[in-house]
């Protein structure tokens, strides 16, 4: 669908970009059981890893970019540092070989490692050491928020999901109305 739209509206896609896909690792990649730590009994793990890598490579060839969403979808802002590092180790061992290195981190649950202050401290230093430069949280209270330094770019995003749809319908922090009318998009049978 996206390719058809871009073909009809080429100005939609800057430099032929497609999108940024946030990946976790605990349940495998692209429907394949690629996690050796979670599926040690998978006799087809090498085959699944190869197939998932082929999917990732094909997507990258089409202009898609991958981001880490952590290996285990952990709350990066509050989880203890040992678990934080263990999770990143699993990302590097199990996901990065499939999707490739990335400089992008999309925080699970929007759990940023700082409030609005400039990044500093052990969590940021660790992530910087792991090669991350672009950080994305979630803030459904404001249209746009960004912080840029010489070392990183950090910005918030608005989640477009059932939780935000509920907030819109209740009038609690409505931010989607400038993009679309939730009442026209939501399935009334749900």
Image: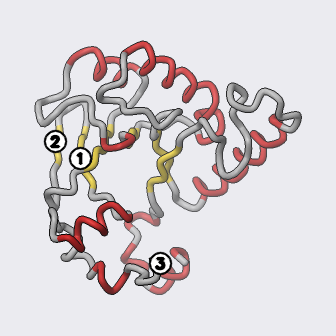
Label 2 residue SS = strand
Q: Label 3 crowding class (10 Å Cα cut-off): few <14, some 14-19, many 20+?
A: some
Residue depicted at x 15% and y 62%: 173
Cα separation between marks 3 and 1:
25 Å
* Model colouring: secondary structure
Left or right: 157 as drawn, with respect to 16 = left
Figure quadrant of the C terminus: bottom left
Mark closer to the observer (3, 2): 2
Residue depicted at x 69% and y 53%: 55
Figure quadrant of the N terminus: bottom right
Name which quarter of the figure residue 114 lies in: top left
- Residue positioned most to the left: 117
Observer-nearest residue: 115 or 19? 115
- The tag on residue 155 is 1
- The tag on residue 147 is 2
Question: Circles 2 and 1: CB distance less than 8 Å?
Answer: yes
Residue depicted at x 77% and y 48%: 51
Relative to residue 85, is residue 167 depicted above or below? below
Relative to residue 164, is residue 183 depicted above or below? below
- The tag on residue 6 is 3
Q: Which numbered disc, 2 or 1, marks the residue that appears first in the sequence?
A: 2
Relative to residue 132, is residue 80 depicted above or below? above
Name which quarter of the figure residue 154 lies in: top left
Return the x and y of residue 178 as percentages of the image width and height. Answer: 19, 76
Mark closer to the observer (3, 1): 1
- The tag on residue 13 is none
Cα separation between marks 3 and 2:
30 Å
Return the x and y of residue 12 as percentages of the image width and height. Answer: 37, 75
Left or right: 28 as drawn, with respect to 12 = right
């Amino acid at each position: 669908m996206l390719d058809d739209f871009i073909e009809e509206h080429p100005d939609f896609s800057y430099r032929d970009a497609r999108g940024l896909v946030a990946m976790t690792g605990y349940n495998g990649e692209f429907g394949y059981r690629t996690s050796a730590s979670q599926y040690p009994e998978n006799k087809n793990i090498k085959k699944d890893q190869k197939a998932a890598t082929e999917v990732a490579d094909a997507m990258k060839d089409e202009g898609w970019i991958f981001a880490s969403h952590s290996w285990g979808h952990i709350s990066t802002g509050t989880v203890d540092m040992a678990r934080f590092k263990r999770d990143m180790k699993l990302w590097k061992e199990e996901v990065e070989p499939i999707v490739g290195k990335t400089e992008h981190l999309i925080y699970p649950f929007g759990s940023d490692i700082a409030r609005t202050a400039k990044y500093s401290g052990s969590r940021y230093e660790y992530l910087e050491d792991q090669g991350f430069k672009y950080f994305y949280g979630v803030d459904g209270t404001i249209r746009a928020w960004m912080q840029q330094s010489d070392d990183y770019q950090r910005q918030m995003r608005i989640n477009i999901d059932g939780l935000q749809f509920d907030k819109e319908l209740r009038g609690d922090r409505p931010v989607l109305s400038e993009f679309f009318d939730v009442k026209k998009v939501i399935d009334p049978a749900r």
